[in-house]
């Protein structure tokens, strides 16, 4: 089945409030189902290649990571020595390095390149609007469709406490919430905010862990009784409604059933790999010197949210495409990097110092990814690990800062969630292959049947090469 989103189809969102103050967004997608040729294989626990899934008794998870302004120079093989991603060498067998995909859908207006590229998870151009880009003249609105993480969350996130979680690291430092500082969308003009504070995330997500079990059970029972009452009232109204209103009612009732499933899922029980993350005392969130410390706390929180099965879909956004940040905790030629990274990326390739500093910064981001992969890989799940059961995708809004290009975009995939043969380096350069095809492959890897995603003019197939 083809997934299609449009600019206006999700411009307004109905909401259901109840169950002790819970606010639930109603489903934004119609059921995707499974294509006949995929259903038997999935039920049998096999991938498209016919290989057995890794640790199929454990859930698949999706994590999407953003780093700002591109500027990744990826090696041509799987020997990472001397490259920007040398820190990832211990995980080479669990990586897919992708070079040469084109984010050509984001060459279309409105907006300037940084604005356009921040819609990379939607595979669609931006809507018109009055948000001013970095150039000071071009404007845009929000993205014009749902992002791939939310499309997947609508399918695999209905039984967890949180459908998805969105971790930010100083994403609002340089511009506040606007099109250049978010990457996830529930639909057209429906951006999903990041949570930049590890302490707020802890309070929101982990506050019930370790609580009195009897008290938690009473709260769950009370919320279930509210849902039962609401469902009964809606059922009594149904015979009096016309066709259109009945359709709306069915959407509300479906939302109630999904919330009931979430309340019935025990999940998030302390013990084993699920433990309360340590966050310590709050620090100044917006201070550039704290960027690394805040990022580590967010990664620890994210790993534990997966281990406790609080969510199966998450994003981690480092900074934003505005990104006028220094890196005072890193050094180049013995001196702290106090330069504006955005400006560094605008310098010509011949500027040795600017690109030397950018290399140090990219090596640091590589080390952060290695830390996160290590955390996930340390959690055993059956014959594999939590990393093996997680699909991780790292990308950016541009391929290179001084060209502001969306072409030849680099991506790093990790874990694979049992879908792809890992440990390979794939070069798509010159093939005019859109990254929308990668988005379709991500859907398929997570068990969602689809042949298109985003703008159909820039998507003609899943990225079959990922299956080998």
Image (spheres, helix red, strand yellow):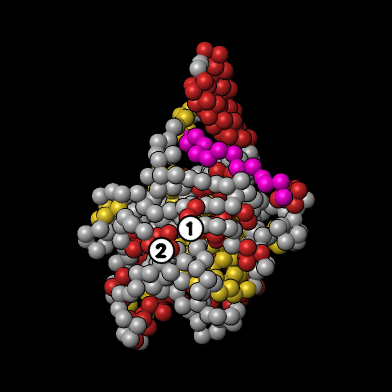
Q: Quadrant of residue 292?
A: bottom left
Q: Quadrant of residue 103?
A: bottom left
Which callout, 1 or 2, points at the residue further toward the start of the chain? 2
**Seen from this angle, which residue lies furthest left?**
137
In the picture, measured across the screen, residue 234 lies left or right of residue 342, that is: right
Residue 278 spot, x, y in % from top left = 50, 57
Q: Is residue 31 magenta?
A: yes
| Marks 1 and 2, how far apart at CA | 17 Å
Q: Nearer the viewer, residue 293 or 225?
A: 225
> Badge 1: few (under 14), some or many (20 or more) residues near its Cα, within 10 Å?
many
Which residue occupies 62% across, 65% down? 466
The quadrant of the rendering that contains the C terminus is: bottom right
Q: Nearer the viewer, residue 76 or 197?
A: 76
The correct choice, above or below, for 119 with respect to 12 in the image is below
Q: Examine the rendering and report whether any part of residue 107 can be seen.
A: yes
In the picture, measured across the screen, residue 126 lies left or right of residue 426, that is: left
Per the rendered image, the range of residues in magenta is 24-37
Q: Helix or strand or loop: what does disc 1 sit on?
A: helix
Residue 467 spot, x, y in % from top left = 66, 64
Q: Examine the rendering and report whether any part of residue 370 can be seen.
A: no
In the picture, measured across the screen, residue 81 lies left or right of residue 125, that is: right
Q: Main secondary structure of the magenta part?
A: loop
Which residue corresponds to mark 2? 397
The correct choice, above or below, for 431 with respect to 302 in the image is below
Q: Determine which of the numbered discs, if any, sits on residue 458 in the image.
A: 1
**Seen from this angle, which residue lies furthest right?**
44
Q: Helix or strand or loop: what does disc 2 sit on?
A: loop
Q: Is residue 389 magenta?
A: no
Which is closer to the viewer, label 1 or label 2? Answer: 1
Which residue occupies 56% across, 66% down? 413
């Amino acid at each position: 089945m083809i997934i299609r989103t449009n600019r206006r189809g999700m411009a307004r969102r109905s909401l259901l409030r109840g169950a002790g103050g819970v606010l639930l967004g109603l489903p934004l997608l119609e059921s995707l189902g499974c294509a006949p040729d995929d259903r038997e294989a999935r039920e049998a626990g096999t991938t498209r290649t016919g290989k057995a899934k890794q640790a199929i008794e454990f859930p698949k998870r999706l994590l999407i990571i953003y780093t700002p302004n591109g500027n990744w120079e990826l090696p041509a093989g799987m020997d990472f020595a001397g490259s920007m991603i040398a820190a990832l060498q211990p995980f080479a067998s669990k990586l897919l390095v992708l070079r040469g995909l084109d984010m050509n859908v984001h060459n279309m207006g409105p907006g300037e390149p940084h604005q356009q590229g921040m819609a990379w998870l939607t595979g669609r151009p931006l809507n018109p609007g009055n948000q001013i880009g970095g150039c000071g003249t071009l404007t845009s609105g929000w993205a014009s469709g749902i992002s791939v993480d939310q499309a997947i969350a609508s399918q695999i996130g209905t039984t967890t406490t949180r459908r998805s979680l969105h971790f930010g690291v100083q994403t609002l430092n340089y511009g506040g919430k606007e099109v250049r500082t978010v990457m996830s969308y529930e639909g057209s003009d429906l951006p999903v905010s990041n949570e930049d504070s590890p302490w707020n995330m802890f309070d929101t997500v982990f506050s019930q862990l370790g609580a009195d079990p009897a008290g938690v059970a009473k709260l769950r029972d009370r919320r279930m009784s509210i849902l039962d009452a609401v469902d009964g009232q809606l059922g009594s109204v149904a015979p009096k409604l016309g066709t259109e209103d009945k359709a709306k009612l069915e959407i509300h009732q479906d939302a109630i059933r999904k919330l009931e499933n979430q309340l019935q899922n025990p999940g998030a029980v302390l013990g084993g790999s699920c433990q309360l993350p340590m966050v310590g005392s709050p620090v100044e969130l917006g201070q550039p010197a704290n960027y690394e410390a805040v990022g580590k706390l967010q990664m620890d929180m994210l790993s534990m949210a997966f281990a406790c099965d609080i969510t199966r879909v998450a994003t981690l956004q480092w900074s934003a495409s505005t990104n006028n940040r220094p890196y005072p905790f890193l050094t180049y030629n013995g001196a702290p990097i106090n330069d504006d990274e955005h400006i560094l990326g605008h310098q010509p390739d011949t500027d040795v110092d600017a690109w030397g500093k950018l290399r140090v910064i990219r090596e640091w981001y590589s080390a952060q990814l290695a830390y996160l992969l290590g955390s996930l890989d340390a959690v055993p799940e059956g014959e594999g690990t939590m990393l093996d059961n997680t699909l991780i995708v790292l990308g950016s809004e541009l391929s290179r800062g001084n060209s502001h290009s969306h072409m030849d975009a680099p991506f790093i995939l990790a874990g694979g969630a049992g879908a792809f043969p890992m440990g390979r380096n794939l070069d798509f350069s010159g093939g005019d292959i859109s990254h929308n095809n990668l988005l379709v492959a991500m859907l398929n890897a997570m068990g969602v049947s689809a042949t298109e995603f985003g703008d159909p003019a820039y998507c003609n197939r899943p990225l079959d090469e990922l299956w080998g």
